[in-house]
Amino acid sequence: MANEKAARRYATAIFSLACDAKIEARIGEELKSVSDAIAGDAELQGFFVSPVLSRALKERALLATFGTKVHEIVAHSLVLLVRKRREALLGEIVRQYHAIERAARGGEPLTVTTASPLAAADLDALVKKLESRFGKKFDVETNVDPHAIGGVRVMMGDRLIDATVAGRLDDLARNLFAQRT
């Protein structure tokens, strides 16, 4: 919880700087790329979060690695994390940044899960219906779950609409069990 609050503060500050420069999406993409690169390499991750290594060494290494490849807001944010010994917050900062960015755009997360890949036209039609029904814009993520058997499961924030065959079978089993007792 404390880490989430600290990460949100950093993400808010970074987002504010990105808004001033009118490059919110770019900064979000670069933060994610840097975070993914660090998290994807165990040796680099160990180097980045190691409390034993000097801050100056980490700063030089980060600037040499990412300094010219990312915007200065991202580079300075990484250096600040190192200086404040908050390197471990990077992943959470990225998550918080994207949540802030999505809220600023008026978008909400929407996860669509199906048993097999959904055709683009069908997905677009579903999203348009949901957007018009709820009066919101959605950032869509699709998942394929063969255990769903068929149908679609839609997750909007904390609201779940489960119209999968597996979901219906679970409901049927619960109803039958409830009637037995």
Image: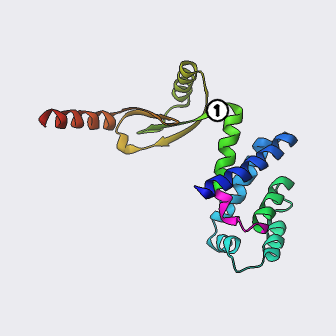
Colour scheme shown: rainbow
Circle 1: is it few (<14), some (14-19), or many (20+) Cα within 10 Å?
Answer: some
Give residue 169's position: percent from left, percent from top: 27, 36
- Residue 44 figure quarter: bottom right
| Residue 94 image position (x, y, % from top left) | 67, 52
Measured from the top left, where is residue 175 in percent x and y?
Answer: 21, 33
The residue beneath circle 1 is 107
Going by the numbered disc 1, the residue's amino acid type is Gly
Q: Is residue 103 visible?
A: yes
Residue at image coords 48%, 38%: 117
Q: Determine which quarter of the picture holds residue 179.
A: top left
Q: Name the residue rendered at 51%, 31% in the picture.
A: 119
Helix, strand or loop at disc 1?
strand
Dividing the picture into quadrants, the one containing residue 99 is top right
Name the residue furthest bottom. 52
Where does the magenta region start and end?
A: 83-91
Regarding residue 93, the answer to whether it shows in the image is: no
Indicate whether residue 89 is drawn in magenta.
Answer: yes
Determine whether, in the image, residue 174 is placed left or right of residue 53: left
Task: State the image coordinates of residue 46 (x, y, percent, origin top left).
Answer: 65, 74
